[in-house]
């Protein structure tokens, strides 16, 4: 079997990265997992978030990882967009 590797470049180049430019830290996660997503099973996404939450709990940061599961398809609906805006506003505007 051929091994496939992925390289995430969104964090590369420090202050020039998309993450740093927007003020979002890698420790902040909002996972939007629509109930009727045809590409990902909600139960799998929930399990991943719960496993990651165990690490966040070790650092008393469980409030920094959230999952939002609207009863919708895999699209950026007005409800999902509003939830994303609220989440960003809570973290970026002090």
Image (spheres, helix red, strand yellow):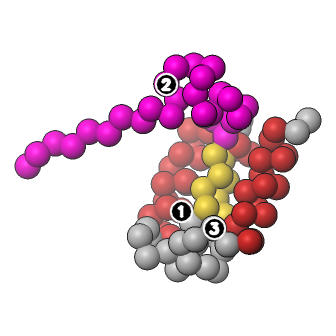
**Is residue 10 placed above or below 82 in the rendered structure?**
above
How crowded pointer 2 is (Cα within 10 Å; few <14, some 14-19, many 20+) is rated as: few
Provide the secondary structure element on which disc 1 rests.
Answer: helix
Residue nearest the viewer, comparing 29 with 12: 12
Between disc 3 and disc 1, whose residue precedes? 1
Q: Which residue is mark 1?
A: 46
Q: Nearer the viewer, mark 2 or mark 1?
A: 2
Residue extending farthest top: 14
Task: Compute the Cα span from label 2 to label 1.
Answer: 28 Å
Residue at screen point 32% across, 39% down: 6
Residue nearest the viewer, comparing 90 with 66: 90
**Is residue 57 placed above or below 37 in the rendered structure?**
above
Report x, y in % for residue 72.
61, 79
Report x, y in % for residue 36.
52, 80
Is 48 on the left or on the right of 70, as rendered? Answer: left
Residue at screen point 43% across, 68% down: 40
Q: Which residue is mark 2?
A: 12
Report x, y in % for residue 53.
59, 47
Task: Compute the Cα span from label 3 to label 1.
Answer: 19 Å
How crowded pointer 3 is (Cα within 10 Å; few <14, some 14-19, many 20+) is rated as: few
Q: Which residue is mark 3?
A: 76
Q: Is residue 58 visible?
A: no
Q: Is residue 6 highlighted in magenta?
A: yes
Between disc 2 and disc 3, whose residue precedes? 2
Provide the secondary structure element on which disc 2 rests.
Answer: loop
What secondary structure characterizes most of the magenta part?
A: loop
Quarter placement of the C terminus:
top right
Residue extending farthest front: 16
Residue at screen point 70% across, 67% down: 80
Magenta range: 1-28
Q: Nearer the viewer, mark 3 or mark 1?
A: 3
Q: Quadrant of residue 55?
A: top right
């Amino acid at each position: 079997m051929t091994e496939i590797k992925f390289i995430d470049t969104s964090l590369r180049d420090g202050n020039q990265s998309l993450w740093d430019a927007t003020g979002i830290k890698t420790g902040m996660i909002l996972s939007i997992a629509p109930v009727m997503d045809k590409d990902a099973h909600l139960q799998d996404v929930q399990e991943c978030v719960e496993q990651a939450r165990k690490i966040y709990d070790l650092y008393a940061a469980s409030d920094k990882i959230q999952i939002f599961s609207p009863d919708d398809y895999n699209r950026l609906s007005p409800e999902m967009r509003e939830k994303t805006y609220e989440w960003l506003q809570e973290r970026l505007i002090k």
